[in-house]
Amino acid sequence: MLTTPLTPEPNPTIEQAGADAAATLGADFLFGVSTASYQIEGAVTEDGRGRSVWDDFCDRPGAIRDGSSGATACDSYHRYPEDVALMSGLGVGAYRFSIAWPRIQPDGVGAVNPAGLDYYDRLVDALLAAGIAPAATLFHWDLPSALQERGGWLERDTAYRFAEYAGHVVDRLGDRVAMWMPVNEPNVVTTLGHATGIHAPGMTLGFGSLQVAHHLLLGHGLAVARLRAGGATQVGCANNHLPIWPASPDPADVGAAGIFDAIYNRFFIEPMLRGEYPDGMGAMLTGPVAEDLQTISVPLDFYGLNTYNPVRVGSPEGAIATAVLGARPEVAAGTPAGMPFIQLPVDEYPHTAFDWPVVPAAMTQLLLDLTERYPGIPPIYITENGCSYPTSPGPDGTIEDVERVDFYAQHLRAVGRARQRGADVRGYFAWSLLDNFEWAEGYEQRFGLVWVDFGTFARSPKASYHWYAGLIAAVRAGSAAGDLTS
């Protein structure tokens, strides 16, 4: 959301941040971890699974940085009992996973593949046996290839096919899944998959991708209705939000940041919560938009928030952008040519291996901003938050990923501070349980609490895994006591 840039301040120590988080989150706070099907499952040709747009995209030369794919990923399709045991060791209360549409309907339509539903049936039962609540995402980007050949999300019909798929899943799993999120990050699917071509299906439509966004939102609304008809009682979303900082107080920079905010943030939250598109942008869309908005804005039981970092945005012709591009022309690669805004560096903070700025206070800022701007917002769950660092096993096999420990300590403290100031935040899902296939980056970015050897699929908990387990135990005990540094 469009917010005021923060002045860098020293963070407390890991010990103090962890103690603050443990003291403010509350014993009823839900801790979890998140993953996505294509990123961890592998087994892309087994048990009747059809092809997805990500299988196709990975076949394109140069599409994936290291030339890899999710064909094997973490092999979680076969090793899910081991992964459930790792979650049990963490003490998490919930696991957010995604269901692969091509496993359920290989062509995205028609008959159901029984083996696909059987797999998720086994996973859900294993979670429940371990005392972990299943939290299912229906679409985390792996659209069946056959539907893409028919137009994919550019076609309105895909939203209706998605609702049918949702029905098949809830009819099988609805008696046991605790939380449902129909579409993961529709804005990322729109921008990276259809506007810039960085992600599957690799389309470069620019502003033409807004029709894709509308159909994703329509699919969300139709799926919410079908999930509720199938007995689901906790249905929300998983929207990505960026705190957006204008490059300067200059009206041109503020205006450019406002346009980016409208396209990236408001275009997705306001149809859900207000039943309208921002700034008259619905006029750019085709179809019965007003009628669709009634479907999209069906009330939610919770608001799922994925967030990682703030961005700085300015006018491409502004003084700040001109100066930055003069010294660092490569910055222009971060924004498609011809856009009325440009993303500029946030250099005053440390960065992750993904080159994302680490600004824990921006988490508090975002949560309070959402609470203030959208008074009717349902209870919030942080459905994704995490960081990539390349820390590998040392000579003794331990993985001392201190930077990740610090990231989680500071961000969970930031969540606690937002709760103290009135934000109704009820849970936090760390991204991610496992190092995994990180989309266009391949296996070069590691977000996991658990190290994965992608040759043998061996799992090794990192220091951050043990720290997170310690924090969860301390919060559940209702005390900030305990060693939260190891």
Image (tube, rainbow, N blue to C red):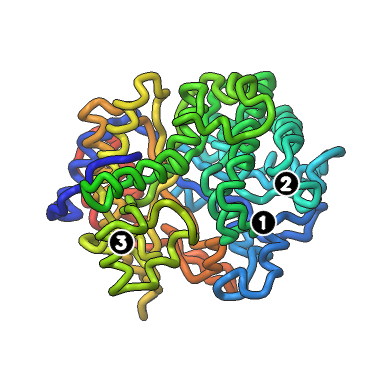
Distance CA(mark 1)–CA(mark 3): 31 Å
Residue pointed to by mark 3: 321
Task: Give how far apart the Cα atoms at labels 2 and 3 are.
Answer: 36 Å
Relative image position of residue 415 (x, y in whole percent): 28, 39
Q: Say which element carries label 3.
A: helix
Mark 2–mark 1 Cα distance, whole angstroms, equals 9 Å
* In the rendered image, the vertical position of residue 419 relative to residue 362, given as above or below: above
Q: Is residue 64 visible?
A: yes
Point out residue 412 in the picture as x, y percentages from the top left corner. Answer: 28, 44
Determine the secondary structure under disc 2: helix
User: Which element is circle 1 on?
Assistant: loop
Q: Is residue 98 above or below residue 166?
A: below
- Between tags 1 and 3, which lies in front? 3
Q: Which mark is residue 201?
A: 1
For label 2, the residue is 152
Q: Earlier in the sequence, mark 2 or mark 1?
A: 2
Of residues 403 and 191, the one drawn nearer to the viewer in this rendering = 191
Kind of residue sitting beneath label 2? Gly
Residue at 66% from the left image edge and 33% from the top image edge: 286
The quadrant in which the N terminus is found is top left
Frontmost residue, 301 versus 58:
58
Q: Nearer the viewer, residue 91 or 389?
A: 389
